Image (cartoon, rainbow, N blue to C red):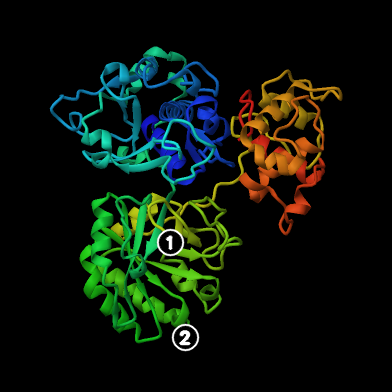
């Protein structure tokens, strides 16, 4: 994790996956007020180009060095625009990268998290973008223009392009030569400016430096001939698993192009055989004659479902062993719940990693990448390496369904390529403390003194473990937060008014708005089987207080907001 990688990740998340449109004026900061720790926004919001850049940098500083929300070392989005963003960044560790006027890119190309300015006071047009990739022609993210074609618009992205990710070389300001400077974070400079955060730097990892900037998990897709027109350079995927063959007679006509495009885009590549009930040796032969040339550059997978279930796990083992022998790698197997129940997989589970399709909400994740709980399955237990959690996903850049997958451990993927024994780290046990290191609440559904004290602490008000019946400052902060993140239309439908009265009294309207936010933002907090009417009742019942406690355990002291 680094300032640059987090900055780019947040900007990309906002532009590609969240309901954030473009507008200047009062709503330009609303995305920042509404977003959770991962950049997820529960209701339509807005940004402009400089508020997106400033806010994304603030996320980078917060997550990398623990700079508290609201601290002056962060770039408060309301305080910055393209005319003063340079000075704001330079006061927080950024330096200008040498960029000769005659070149289209700075010396050495771009790096992830670079901020590229077209400052009006320096001869530009008043715009800024965030670089998402290393190289000379990277993807970039930006808040571009409102649905009106002007600077002001309604909340949310009505066109799908108000906030967007595009190729640098295709940007109109690149074609016009309108960029004025590129700025890159310098850690040493930041520590000189803000020495109080030098000791908060995360401890060095024994992992190689190249991997240290990456999160342990990764998100990706699996594709076949049905996605022959997919632009793999533009799609947001850390890895792509490509169907090569089916049985002994079908070859995906696009697989080589898909594989090469994946590697050219710097993404991890997997190749799979979709098995049927034909001879397993012949199926392996048909696949390997085509795919084994990618040994050392890809992982190999056996997709065992549908007609393959007419065979036995021992037949799958024949194919896996042949894959291993001829590629020098450790292949993996894809199973769904039906496949898991079709036989005894113990001989395979001890040697080959699992790519599992399923889970309680398999067909309902829908819109974008998610981080669902890792399912526990027979034979492999909790050691699922890849979780295909929906077949109905959508990603910007492709107008049809996609299978969305979560890789739990990048290092395990790399172990597969090398042919070693693949160790999948077990799911993390619950932390004994809250995310900010404070005392963790028991999630018991009781609004007792400890819960009230933590609530006051998170809201940044005096802590005494009591809420005054005639108005509490902590509840006022809570109501202001809810007004910032739950849209006026939603509140009108919930409570008959476009916003809560910030009166410090937690009545039914306040609890209904909180319940609505939980259902939109963290549906996993809602008891299983409860529908909208069951959950959103405006009462501070046990389930609602348990959701509040869970939210407080995942919030930061003195932040003034949940999550």
Q: Nearer the viewer, residue 169 or 387?
A: 169
Please tell me whether mark 2 sits on a helix, a strand or a loop: helix
**Residue extending furthest toward the left:** 102
Marker disc for residue 310: 2
**Residue extending furthest toward the right:** 469
**Residue shown at 55% from the left, 47% from the top:** 428
The image shows residue 162, relative to residue 404, as above or below, that is above
Look at mark 1 in the image and give the residue it sits on: 400
The spot of residue 408 in percent (x, y) is 46, 52
The spot of residue 332 in percent (x, y) is 39, 66
The spot of residue 110 in percent (x, y) is 25, 34
The image shows residue 434, relative to residue 215, as above or below, that is above
Marker disc for residue 141: none
* Disc 1/disc 2 C-alpha distance (Å): 31 Å
Q: Which of 343 and 465 is in front in this view?
A: 465
The image shows residue 343, relative to residue 188, as above or below, that is below
**Residue shown at 63% from the left, 23% from the top:** 558
Disc 2 packing (10 Å; few <14; some 14–19; many ≥20): few
Residue 41 makes an appearance in the image: yes
**Residue shown at 52% from the left, 31% from the top:** 32
Q: Is residue 255 left or right of residue 356?
A: left
The spot of residue 529 in percent (x, y) is 73, 59
Q: Quadrant of residue 54?
A: top left
Please tell me whether mark 1 sits on a helix, a strand or a loop: loop
Quadrant of the image containing the N terminus: top left
Disc 1 packing (10 Å; few <14; some 14–19; many ≥20): few
In front: label 1 or label 2: 1
Q: Nearer the viewer, residue 314 or 310?
A: 310
Quadrant of the image containing the C terminus: top right
């Amino acid at each position: 994790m680094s300032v640059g990688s987090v900055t780019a990740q947040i900007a990309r998340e906002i532009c590609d996956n969240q309901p954030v449109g473009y507008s200047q004026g009062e709503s330009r900061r609303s995305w920042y007020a509404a977003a959770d720790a991962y950049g997820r926004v529960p209701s339509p919001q807005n940004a402009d180009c400089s508020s997106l850049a400033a806010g994304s940098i603030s996320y980078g500083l917060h997550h990398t060095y623990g700079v508290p929300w609201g601290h002056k070392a962060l770039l408060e989005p309301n305080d910055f625009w393209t005319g003063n963003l340079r000075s704001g960044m330079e006061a927080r560790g950024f330096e200008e990268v040498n960029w000769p006027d005659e070149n289209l890119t700075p010396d050495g190309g771009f790096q992830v998290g670079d901020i590229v300015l077209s400052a009006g006071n320096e001869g530009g047009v008043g715009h800024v973008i965030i670089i998402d990739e290393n190289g000379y022609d990277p993807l970039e993210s930006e808040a571009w223009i409102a649905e009106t074609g002007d600077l002001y618009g309604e909340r949310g992205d009505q066109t799908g392009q108000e906030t967007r990710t595009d190729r640098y070389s295709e940007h109109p300001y690149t074609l016009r030569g309108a960029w004025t400077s590129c700025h890159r974070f310098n850690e040493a400079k930041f520590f000189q400016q803000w020495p109080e955060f030098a000791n908060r730097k995360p401890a060095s990892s024994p992992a190689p430096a190249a991997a240290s900037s990456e999160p342990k998990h990764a998100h990706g897709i699996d594709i076949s001939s049905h996605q022959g027109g997919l632009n793999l350079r533009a799609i947001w995927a850390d890895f792509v698993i490509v169907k090569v063959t089916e049985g002994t007679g079908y070859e995906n006509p696009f697989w080589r192009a898909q594989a090469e495009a994946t590697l050219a885009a710097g993404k991890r590549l997997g190749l799979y055989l979709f098995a049927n009930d034909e001879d397993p040796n012949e199926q392996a032969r048909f696949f390997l004659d085509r795919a084994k040339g990618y040994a050392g550059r890809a992982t190999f997978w056996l997709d065992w479902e549908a007609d393959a279930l007419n065979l036995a796990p021992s037949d799958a083992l024949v194919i896996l062993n042949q894959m291993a022998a001829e590629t020098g790698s450790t292949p993996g197997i894809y199973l769904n719940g039906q496949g898991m129940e079709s036989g005894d997989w113990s001989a395979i589970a001890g040697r080959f990693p699992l790519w599992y399709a399923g889970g309680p909400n398999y067909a309902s994740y829908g819109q974008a990448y998610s981080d669902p709980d890792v399912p526990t399955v027979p034979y492999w237990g909790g050691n699922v390496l890849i979780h295909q959690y929906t077949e109905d996903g959508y990603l910007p850049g492709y107008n049809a369904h996609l299978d969305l997958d979560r890789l739990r451990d990048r290092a395990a993927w790399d172990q597969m390529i090398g042919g070693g024994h693949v160790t999948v780290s077990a799911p993390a046990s619950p932390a004994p403390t809250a995310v900010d290191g404070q005392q963790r609440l028991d999630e018991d559904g009781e609004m007792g003194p400890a819960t009230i004290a933590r609530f006051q602490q998170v809201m940044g008000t005096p802590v005494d473990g009591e809420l005054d019946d005639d108005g509490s400052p902590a509840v006022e902060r809570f109501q202001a937060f809810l007004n910032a993140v739950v849209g006026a239309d939603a509140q009108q439908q919930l409570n008959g008014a476009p916003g809560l009265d910030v009166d410090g009294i937690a009545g039914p309207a306040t609890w209904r708005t909180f319940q609505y936010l939980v259902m939109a933002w963290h549906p996993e907090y809602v008891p299983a089987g409860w529908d909208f009417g069951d959950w959103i009742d405006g009462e501070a019942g046990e389930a609602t207080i348990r959701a509040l406690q869970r939210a407080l355990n995942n919030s930061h002291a003195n932040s003034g907001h949940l999550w």
